[in-house]
Image (cartoon, rainbow, N blue to C red):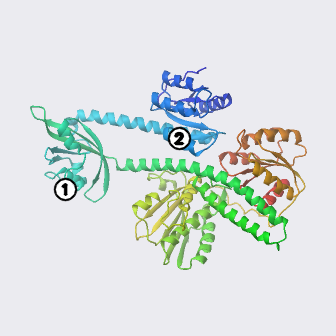
Amino acid sequence: MIEEPKKSTIQGSATILIIDDDPGTCQTLNHILKGKGYLPACVNNGKDAIKAVQDGFVNLALIDLKLPDMPGLDVLEKIKELSPDTEAVIITGHASVDTAVQAMHDAFSYVTKPIDMDHLLSIIARALEKQTLRTERKQAQDALRESEEKLAGILGSVTDHMSMIDKKYNILWANNIAKSLFGSDLVGKKCYAAYHGHSKVCELCAVENCFKDGKTHHHEIEATAADGSQMTFWCTTSVAARYEDGRPKTVLEISRDITERKKLEAQFFKAQKMEAIGTLAGGIAHDFNNILTVILGDAQLISMDIDPANPHYELAKEIENRVKAGANLTKQLLGFARSGKYEIKPINLNEVVRESSTTFGRAKKEITLHRKLQKNLSPIEADRGQIEQVLMNLYVNAAYAMPSGGDLYLKTRVIANEDTQGKHFSIEPANHVLLSVTDTGVGMDKETLERIFDPFFTTRKMGRGTGLGLASVYGIIKAHKGYIKVESEQDRGTTFKIYFPVSEKEVAKPAKIADQVLKGTETILLVDDEAPVLKTGAKILNTLGYTVLKAKSGHEAVNIYKTNQKKIDMVILDMIMPDIGGGKVYDLMKQINPDIKVLLCSGYSIDGRSTEILEHGCNGFIQKPFDVKNLSGIIREILEE
């Protein structure tokens, strides 16, 4: 049964086709999209989806990978064949590498079930924006062709650079715009020499082709202006005058400066690439954290159960240390994936800069620190540990650029909203705290500067760096709704400028950390879909003295809690599960017992849904892999509230 989509344009309410055989998913998406002003329509199989696209234009299709009559990727291929301008977002129940790669080939992006609605709405908005840009570009090209037909009447008013060229490539005439860019003595010069600095005709020369076939040619070129700057132009070359027999006599070349547009496009495509890789990196980190949880838990159980004099005790402790090193690596992956915000609260950035730089300075005495920190600096909302990670990565990067020592300048100040507007970077309207980190090192060339935030890119020797340091810096800053820019030249040092939105909240007091393993006798329901994590977690809780009930799925957890709620004192709940996610499980348990005590747990870090649950009464969050001592302290803190 097909609900007919209403006709719409990109500029109006966009038509979105939901292709999913799950009635609940269709109903939820339909309701939410309608509420956002879109025009959704639902179908439950591939055949009906193809018919809907044949019957009318669809702006965007949400395609489930698993459909009853054909694979979702086959449906995507057919939709793209019927309507190339239709954008698509794949919906999958598992974030596999193959799925991610296939989705990025033909679809705009993909989301995994359970669907993070805020994330999906963001993807839809960007996909439709891309569609709008493509339409506007086509309209601009059509307008350009129309302007060529009226060329004779508008020569004196155009703002593009224009030149008349003969068959021997001599510039016969140039407008003032062209002369201002390439010099007042253009007339009489060869076009390939004046615009490109070449000694012979350019390859694939549009002027040459225009004289050969008499047709209009469009092309993009790179040219060097009189001041030495590199510029990009979109050029239109057409016949300006003909001989009586119809042969071209002169051609007119109109060149529009698209240098800034190309820069913006490059930023846009790079952001898309970083987001796709970040999603993949986040999934890998999540799975790896589950593995580390089991190893760390078992190692700590061993060290708690044997005498420190036992030779195996040191082995267990070494395993713990190696697991924690692995956890630090996944922190960087999650940081790059913009999933690195663990505990967000107002912090004093000056305090973090002062403490971290003092620690760094003790280790790198050949580097002189200069701090200029604004007094009474406004707070920012951030995860302190992640900001420390950002700073240490920047310090280490600076030290690598100054192997023989040098100066490191650290500055903070508040800048007003108007001082950040109209720049070449996107930043939310608000006052910001600006942190700048400047070194006097070797600097970077243009090629290195363009790749500095790419994951696994490093200029260091093999084995000396992971290439994740600055990639994680980029991800963490973006996750904190901030912006980072880099200024550098070879042999002239490097400056990183980081913008954080100002917070109106007061700086929070530091939380107490348990200094010993705390035990108890209460009953805890442990929920996790990973059997090894569930087994190890139960052993840890039993060792701490607790009675443990286990659930390996969301549905099982709800049923167990419904039956045993009077004797269950607390629930430790995994956020990511295949049947129903931790968020939904929490909502169902909250309906059973409004006073339920729940500790969220995830191989990811705090995301939008986790934060929402915490704000609605959930008691805490712990990141995998967790330390037994830390876990024991959080459990006692929640139970004794």
- Name the mark on residue 394: none
SS class, disc 2 = helix
Residue 623 in the image, given as x and y percentages of width and height: 71, 55
Mark 1–mark 2 CB contact (< 8 Å): no
| Residue at mark 1 to residue at mark 2: CA–CA distance | 46 Å
Residue 16 in the image, given as x and y percentages of width and height: 55, 30
Query: In this orientation, does residue 522 appear?
Result: yes
Single out the residue that lies furthest toward the left.
Answer: 244
Whether residue 394 sits left or right of residue 511 in the image: it is left
Q: Earlier in the sequence, mark 1 or mark 2?
A: 2
Q: Hey, what amino acid is under mark 1? A: Ser
Whether residue 153 sits left or right of residue 479 in the image: it is left
Instruction: Identify whether 548 is placed above or below 64.
Output: below
Instruction: Identify whether 365 is placed above or below 605.
Output: below
SS class, disc 1 = loop
Residue 522 in the image, given as x and y percentages of width and height: 89, 52
Which residue matches tag 2?
102
- Image-quadrant location for residue 133: top left
Instruction: Identify whether 343 is placed above or below 464.
Output: above
- Which image quadrant: the C terminus? bottom right
Which residue matches tag 1?
199
- Which image quadrant: the N terminus? top right
**Residue at image point 32% right, 33% down:** 142
